[in-house]
Amino acid sequence: MAQPAQVSHRLSLAIFSVTVVAVLGIALLASLLVRRNVEKQHAGVTRADIPESEYRNGFWGRYFPRQYDSYRKTGTVEFQSKYGGSADRDMLSEDPRLVVLWAGYGFSKDYRQGRGHAHAVDDVRKTLRTGAPTGDDDGPMPSACWTCKGPGVVGAMKREGIDGFYKGKWARFGKEIVEPVGCADCHDPSTMDLTITRPALVEGLAHLGRPLEKETHQSMRSLTCAQCHVEYYFDKKESGAQHVSFPWHRGTSCEQMEAYYDTIDFADWTHPISKARMLKAQHPDFELFLTGVHAERGLSCAECHMPYQTEGGQKFTSHHAQSPLNNVARTCQVCHREETADLVADVYQRQDRIAQSRIALEKALVRAHVEAGKAWQLGATDTQMAPILLGIRHAQWRWDFAAASHGASFHSPVEVSRIVALGLDAVQQARVELARVLAALGHTTEVEYPSIATKADAQRFIGLDLEKINAEKKLFLDQVVPKWLLWAREHQLIESEPVGASKL
């Protein structure tokens, strides 16, 4: 039995231990309160100060200067990997065959490497694909082309209604959508929770039986990206509006989306050489990511493209959305312990192997279009050409599905290899049938193929007058865009330098 002195000693130790823990707890709490107060003073405002109608990224930057400073780095364009990056690259110059594959479609005029989010609005103004409008009501492209370019879309949709937003031409919102992809696209202004602001994704998830309210925070770290980094098409309504819609009615695989398009007899355009009704894959990044090992392990897009970082004792998500290869230490090496050079080499090896097959498919498609054009010249009938054109359509859809999805060769190399292989099979079958048709029409020698060693060669072959197109675009950029920006500044849609954000 313990003596009274021993009991008293133990009680004293217990009281002392509890006191130490309590003091440390109070000190820690005080430290956190002080740190948060310093953060608030540095930011200058509280969350409740963000109006629901505030779409200027710089204004949001007052609340979260660290996140905003990292976001501003999406304006840098120095990084270039073997197959991607943020550098301004003319992809048609690098691969002139693309011009022939997209003949009759806007991408044959201009297709450049996508730069960072900070350039989204500037790039869509400058690209030759959006044409050269002279006023607010002319085109040539529909309003839908703004959908993923900036948070001003959120305000325009609220004011006009979804159908109202999608009516009319692209130039209609040129004065209003001036802030590039940013805060209000993905965050609720009152809670900062991740949110979906583009109705097409909500509709697409409904087709998949995925109600948005049941999504987890982790899945939202991919779904906010899936608002834009997906395959979509312009659904023409009776009202005249062209809605951005996702073809997920049967699922998200290459074949399921193709089957949906075939069922509704949809085509993005008709190829002027082969006369095939074509599909243009946009950038099915999310759909292909879902089929890869990282998605199977529960990772989100943000894990690798917007990793966590620490600054001043604060852990936060970097909003410098970029290629993980430009930040290997905070992306790949969080899970993989190999050296940086080895990890990058592994990525390039996968991309190289798929690129070999994809380019083979690309070359065969160019030949198929030209051979089909020759068959029409010799008097081929619709009945003869119908299965051939369907084969070309399906083969190029598979090529584009793999080529247009940024990072797909790494996200899901097995699935992309499968898709490209099926595309090769489809185009070869089409060319075999073409050979039979050409022989029946009396053409037994090899079809003469164009010289398309350069982008200019290829564009001349398909009949593009780039001198005129560029001159019209320059006039638009010199005269119309400055008026848009002046109006936006006068209406305080553009903010100069936000509080608490350092310059790059």
Image: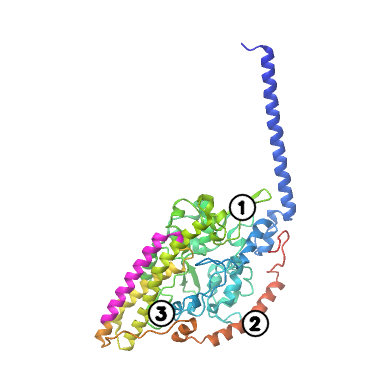
Provide the residue span drawn in magenta: 409-436
- Going from the N terminus, do you reach mark 3 or mark 1 first? 3
Please identify the quadrant where the N terminus is shown.
Answer: top right
Label 2 crowd (10 A; few <14 / some 14-19 / many >=20):
few
In the image, is 383 to the left or to the right of 99?
left
Which amino acid, mark 2? Asp
Residue 434 in picture, x, y percent from top left: 29, 80
Which amino acid, mark 1? Gln
In the image, is 7 to the left or to the right of 252?
right
The answer to whether 182 is drawn above or below residue 480 in the figure is above
Q: Say which of marks 1 and 2 sits in front.
A: 1
Query: Which image quarter: residue 28?
Result: top right
Secondary element at image label 3 = strand
Q: Which mark is residue 309?
A: 1
The magenta stretch spans residue 423: yes
Residues under labels 1 and 2: Cα distance? 41 Å
The magenta stretch spans residue 461: no
- Going from the N terminus, do you reach mark 1 or mark 2 first? 1
| Residue 287 visible in the current orientation | no
Residues under labels 3 and 1: Cα distance? 48 Å
Which amino acid, mark 3? Thr
Q: Which mark is residue 478?
A: 2
Residue 319 in picture, x, y percent from top left: 61, 59
In the image, is 498 to the left or to the right of 187?
right
Secondary element at image label 2 = helix
Residues under labels 2 and 3: Cα distance? 33 Å
The residue under label 3 is: 270
Majority secondary structure of the magenta segment? Answer: helix
Residue 151 in picture, x, y percent from top left: 61, 65
